[in-house]
Amino acid sequence: MTAVLTRRRPRILIAVGCLLAAMVVALLPMPAATVQAVAAEGAQSSAVTKSGTKGKYDDFSDLRVTVHQTEGLRSQGVRVTWEGGKQTQPGNGQFNVDYLQMMQCWGDDPDGPDREQCVYGGSEAVVADTRGRRLDGSQDPDETGGSFVPFRPANGEPPTTDAYDKTYFGPLDTNEQQANLTFANGKGETEFEVQDGIQADYLGCGVNTAAAGSAAALRPCWLVVVPRGNHEPNGREITQPASDRLLTSPLSATNWAQRISFRLDFLQVDNFCPEGQPERPTIGSELMTDAVTSWQPKLCGSTDSTFGFTSAGEEQARSQVMGTSDEAPTLGFTVDPVEQAEGGPAVVHAPVAVSGLTIAFFVEGPSGVIQEMRLNPRIVAKMLTHSYRSDVPSQEHIKNNPLDYTEDPEFKALNPEFPDIPGSPMSLMVPIGNSDTARVLWSWLQSDAEAREFLAGKPDRNGMTVNPYFEELELDQNTGLNEYPKVDPTRGIAAGSGGASLEYTITDLSPYTSDLHDGAVRTRRGNNNRTIQWQAGNGTPDKLVNDPFWPGRRAVMAIVDAASAARYGLPAAALRNADGNYVKPSDDTLLAGVNAMRPRSGDSPVLKPDPARAKGQAYPLTAVTYAAASVNQDAAARKAYAKFIRYAAGPGQTSGLSAGELPPGYAPLPAKLRARAETAADDLERGAVPDGPSDGPGPDDPGAAGSAVAGGAGGDSSGAGIGGAASGAGGAAGGSTAAAASEPAAVNASGAPSSGPQQNVAEAKGGFTPGEIMGVIRWVLVVVLVLGGAAGISGPIMLRLAHRRTP
């Protein structure tokens, strides 16, 4: 008997060990797949590298240029890197020799485009203009053309008539890059803005050129790189770049012969839905633009409807949803809910996207483009109130404040490695108009004690004060604020000869962007489109014109949506959340931001963005966008919009770059929000909703909210709260209430300095949080292992006990 038990004891120990090991494996953190990784993988799969060649005077044969994405393109940023170049030599504040020039061209020839098909010469003032489209036979003996290279558009419209013809592109919309720098190691990089056939019809990239009924034939485009050395085409060498420079155009014959051309294939931009399908309008939040435009081609086939999309303010979307009828069907996208009129038709709210606002930037330092920046709420408050001297036309009323944020001791303490940049950076760009997202950003500032005090007029620890014109708006209290006011009335004198009689205002110095996407585009170009430069009218009145910064000296930032920042490859600032952590937007931090949200009231179907609750790794400017639809429309429209919601909350949440997928900048919806969207879709299709939320979400159930009906009592109908559906007071001082944060930021609750010791940054890993389904499977596995292991162990134990009882 004893011998038998001795043999079985190791089995018990081994079983226990295996069970514990299996549980450890089951509980190990799951590897995080990331949206950024998906994007990078998609970009790398179509990356192309080409080498330069030896020219008549300059040898570019060691130059290797890589375009990191050449397929599946839309209007976006494309990363371009190079190595084996010669270091760019600066002179007189600009870069006069040894740089790369880049341009986008159209062309059907497989060997590449003709120079008449290229966008170049739209911005004459930069890099001593390098002649733009002008030609000079005395500088280039190989040139046999006329005095200029005309631009011939892809859409069949007439070519340009002279070198200064800006019919198709000019300083504010050209994407040409006139001087990309190579550093001492022979390497360089840039993010090139490619434009599709919607943004630039004169290029026509992605337009279907096939005859009706034939297979699609999409027009390709080209990225052309022209390396420049230190010789002109006639052999003249630039030996003193501090005082001499290249003057010839990259389109001149000898320079053009050195070009490196990369074919670019775009996604189809027209006619991707079958003709004759019912057209269903949708309207609303800019946060949905990239998601809906990605989903549209797939929705055509999966829903038998063609869904249009109009990016507009959420208030306009709410108005149209409330006015829905059989004759005017609508699906709206909002962050704040649609408030149901008393006795009116029910409105369902389906969560369809998790995204947020970012402060994106493009700042060139001495060693390249800067990738890291930290901002706390008070610094952003300073920017939004134009409290830095360089952000206003006349500085007398803030004469003791720093010139710009790079000279602010508070910014320097947060960003000790931020390099000195030449010139003064441009002010923070903001979109025009009212929006729910603007309310989210002001809520972030008002939830922070230091920012609130600054907005109320209290100086920071270094004596900097708020611009007094903004102090009158009571921005520390106005919880209905849903826009970005520019109320400084001062005027400045236009720069340039003869400008003494021409003045500019704050909106000339710091123009509004037309929307969040426009802010990303301007940031990518390094130009805020300000017009403070005098230009003689030559027979017409003098005017203000744009004065773009020189390459190597650009410093621009804007409030944009996370999807647009990802689309154009813009770095995002790490923002301080309520725990004092500096967090960048990523799948993980956006989902943590959702987790911090609560319903707007006990029975509200919509989650409230609440930066005061954004703790841990939660990103403070996270927002959930809802598809809102009234049941007051015909059955066919309700069914179609229900299908849209099901796609958006189902297949549309697969992260990726292909049509129908969720683009970078969005985090996949948590499983509970997907389920709520499904419920809302069912209610919409049925045309009736249960009384109150169907699953009864409570105030402590963040993932459960988001379905069913928005009753009049369900949201902040007063309009006084941050999440209220009313438009509030806009930029004015009226309609405000005291805005004490529901949970003030822990770091500031005690008055701790914003540049204090707690400055940890939550890195933007970008990984999706593992799906709830996988999480359930993991725990099921643990339970199975425990039960199975227990059963396996109990057998020998019971047998041993049985032996003990055996006489």
Image: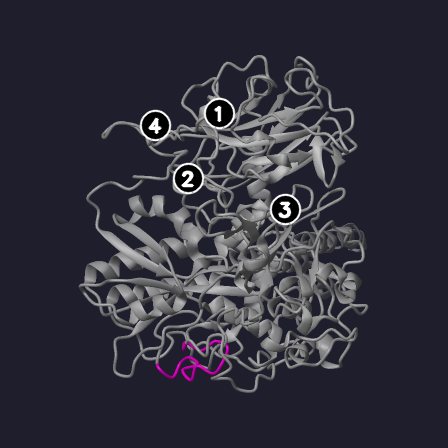
> Residue at position x 56%, y 42% from top?
38
What residue would you read off at disc 3? 549
User: In the rendered image, which quarter is residue 785 located in?
Assistant: bottom right
Relative to 230, is 203 above or below? below
How crowded pointer 1 is (Cα within 10 Å; few <14, some 14-19, many 20+) is rated as many
What residue would you read off at disc 2? 200
The label shown at residue 72 is: none
Judged from the image, the secondary structure of the residue bearing numbered disc 4 is loop
Q: Is residue 687 left or right of residue 784?
A: left
First of labels 2, 4 by sequence position: 2
Main SS, magenta region, reads loop
First of labels 4, 1 by sequence position: 1
Residue nearer the viewer, 74 or 139: 139
Q: Nearer the viewer, mark 1 or mark 3?
A: 1
Q: Is residue 742 left or right of residue 57?
A: left
The stretch of residues the image draws in magenta is 712-726
- Magenta segment: does it hold 755? no
Res 802 visible: no
Judged from the image, the secondary structure of the residue bearing numbered disc 1 is loop
The residues bearing labels 2 and 4 have C-alpha atoms spaced at a distance of 18 Å
The quarter of the image holding the C terminus is: bottom right
The residues bearing labels 2 and 3 have C-alpha atoms spaced at a distance of 23 Å
Q: Nearer the viewer, mark 4 or mark 1?
A: 1
How crowded pointer 3 is (Cα within 10 Å; few <14, some 14-19, many 20+) is rated as many
The label shown at residue 217 is: 4
Q: Is residue 712 left or right of residue 460?
A: left
What type is the residue that disc 1 sits on?
A: Phe
